[in-house]
Image (cartoon, coloured by chain):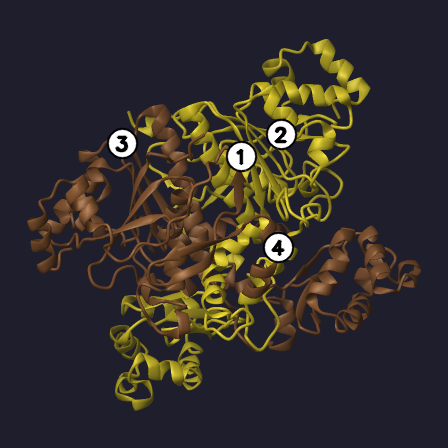
Amino acid sequence: MAAPFKGITVLEYAGFVAGPYCGRLLADLGAEVVKIEAPGAGDPARGYGPFPGNIPNREKSGLFLHLSLNKRSITVDPSTPSGKELFVKLAAKADVLIEDCSPGRMSDMGLGFAQLQELNQSLIYVSVTPYGQTGPHSVWKAQHINTFHASGEGYTLPGGATYAKFPERPPVAAGAHLGEYDAGLMAASGTVAALYARQIWGIGQHVDISKQEATFGLNRLMFTQSESEGHVVDRTRSYVYGGIFPCNDGYVMLYPREDRQWRALVGIMGNPELAEDERFSARASRIENAGEVNAAISRWTQTLGKDEIYSLVAPSGCPVGLYADSQDLHKSPQLQARKFFREVDHPLAGQLSYPVRPYQFSGLPEEATIAAPLLGQHNNEIFCGQLGLPPAELAELRRAGVV
Amino acid sequence: MTAKSNPNRTALSGVRVLDLTNLLAGPFPSLLLALLGAEVIKIESEAQLDAARRPPYAYDDPDASPVFNTINLNKLSVQLNLKEPEAIRLVHGLVSISDAVVENMRPGVMDRLGLGYQQLGKINPTLVFASITGAGGTGPESSYPGYAPAFNALSGLGHLTGYPDGPPGELHDSIDCRVGATAAFAILSGLFHRLRTGEGQFIDLSSRESIAMFTGEALMDFSMNGNGAGNGTTSIRRGNRSPGMAPHGCYPCKGQDAWVTIAVSDDTEWQAFCGAIGHPEWISEPEFRDSSLRQKNQETLDLLIGDWTQTKSPNEATKLLQSAGVAAAPSMTRPDLANDPHLIARGAWQRLEHPVLGRQTVQGPPWILSETPASIHSPSPLLGQHNEYVLQGLLGASKAELAEWLDAGVLN
């Protein structure tokens, strides 16, 4: 069997996390993704890091390397006439274009959806921006912190355990640029939906993704429940009992919601008598005596390490998680068994371990993972090889800073 | 012809999905498929009610759950008690006329019921079968049940959210939807492959891995530098700060627990910011002269900015800063979002009538598709609302058979 997107060509004129995550999800399942980067600086993710030894180098940024696996890179400045011409030639043949410019900017350059659709009726044009293409806030400037807080989820974080310690501190955006990934993921499903539609209806279309709405849409249970119960969820939100507990090398999450889970947990804790104790035996009484429940659990967790607690409790079916850092993830026997990480060699960054795919498709062929491209690595291949540009002209464009 | 004049033209026209899911991580991807036009048939039963139809989401009436409604819009419901062999036979019948199955039962349950991929893939070799579990279908921890707060912890996301000197962040149900959104992408990819080649397949999705994908910058820090435990700038939680930008934070405003977020990415924005808040003299302040100095003196800077933000509401501060070209947005609450003119203008909130709950406000589709719009056409189904359509209409059963199944507890 072939990969799902074998033969689908994607132009990725997008940087940092959101658009590139969309591109990466498609590339991992076989799409031929070409990054169109700004000559000189390239994708802003190249400047972000982390870098080996903390020494900045645009070919060694961890964020960029992660998001650019299986892609190729060309450099073009489409705001110049000859750059625009190259861009248009590529878009005329592409199946998908992912872009993340401020709304209106692409049209100003002659590269808007309507303009490119005239050349390529079946083009799927995916725009990923902070607040979408329409509406009064579409012109707003934003970084991740802004859209994440505008989604409504920021106001609910980091949660009750932090609030108990630092009630005066502000709510926070989730770490690791989570909201950018939310948008990239939603853009990817929108893209595939549009590819599906093209296959049955023969049409291209514009897919408009708002980062604010991507994260907002993932919080529907919380918003609906708080609305129907008439309260506002904020960063004091926590578990009535259970939740985060300190252990001797970090934190664990324990949530013995059901009676059977509580009985299992206290057995493992060496306090089976607590299962019979009327103050804790039913969920309602555990809620009533939450302070004592938590104190008992905490006394136990503090004597142990997070790995130990996890391996003791998880098989019992009581909800438990160790708060993993990157090292814990790399060392996890479960992730190793599923080959979640793969070693990939990059010409400058060397051999590194990368997270590959969170799902396994029974029909996906085993193919090598290709390291992130160097800036403009595929200029010759694509401009001369695919578009037929004479090498002398490419050299000319390079001198002019267009490529 | 435009999409508006052809409302039948949806992205997933003709796609039928069987939904054997519960609560959120499974129902969310089938919701997304239903918004895109797929016919999603939820197989459910009074004997094993969906958790979103039970307390704390609904008490006396399983049809009176606003939460169930919001995550099961556009779907159909058929009541089949999977403990009954006859019900399993009927599911097999549905499998033979469906394109995809999505399930998030506890590991092993589908196999025990005779509904695993081994069995269903034989009935319909072109089936796209997505199994959503906590840890994935293989590996030493595959039998552990999964819970959203646990994946938040196990995926590394909790470790990266919050303050460096405080406990990790507590992300709740949104984590399930993130798993579900990943599953939706995977199922769509499988369906697209099937459409082009006629080949079905099994998709084994791990919730923990779905969330861990988002922590790539920290995972790469460990790969490169061994900074797993938090020495690197990207591998530990850092509140509202971000390397390379200052000011960058969430600041107190006028009003009860009201906050505005501000991010200044370069010197031009810094100058615009100082001008907008009436402190042009900060531009020449040596402590704040460039980005690295502003980052170094961020605590002082944050206090000074807080003095200004406290004189404004989040909306006032946002408007002022946006008009000067500075990135700002309120930290929005549920009521803020409900009244947000932008979200309303984009259809991010929609109203519909539910037969039991009455008028409900729900969130719109997360994409705007110009030619095959995703849309909400129906509220969530009542339990068993589509028994006749599914069993008589699709499977060709008789009225008498339905009555018999009802009596025998197959349909309940």
| Residue position marked by numbered label 3 in the rendering | A122
Q: Quadrant of the C terminus of chain A?
A: bottom left
Instruction: Read off the chain for label 4.
Output: B
Is the same chain shared between marks 4 and 2? yes
10 Å neighbourhood of mark 1: few (<14), some, or many (≥20)? few
10 Å neighbourhood of mark 3: few (<14), some, or many (≥20)? many
What amino acid type should be assigned to the residue bearing mark 1? Ser
Q: Colour of chain B?
A: yellow
Tell me if label 2 and label 1 are in contact, CB under 8 Å. yes
Relative to A149, residue A138 above or below: above
Distance between the alpha carbons at the discs numbered 4 and 2:
25 Å
What amino acid type should be assigned to the residue bearing mark 4? Phe
What amino acid type should be assigned to the residue bearing mark 3? Ser
Q: Is residue B111 left or right of residue A48?
A: right
Q: Residue at x 37, y 76 (%)?
A: B246
Instruction: Read off the chain for label 2.
Output: B
| Residue position marked by numbered label 1 in the rendering | A362
**Mark sitting earlier along the chain (4/2):** 2
Distance between the alpha carbons at the discs numbered 2 and 1:
11 Å
| Residue A232 visible to the viewer | no
Element marked by disc 2: helix
Q: Residue furthest bottom?
A: B286
Element marked by disc 3: loop
| Residue position marked by numbered label 2 in the rendering | B117
Q: Colour of chain A?
A: brown
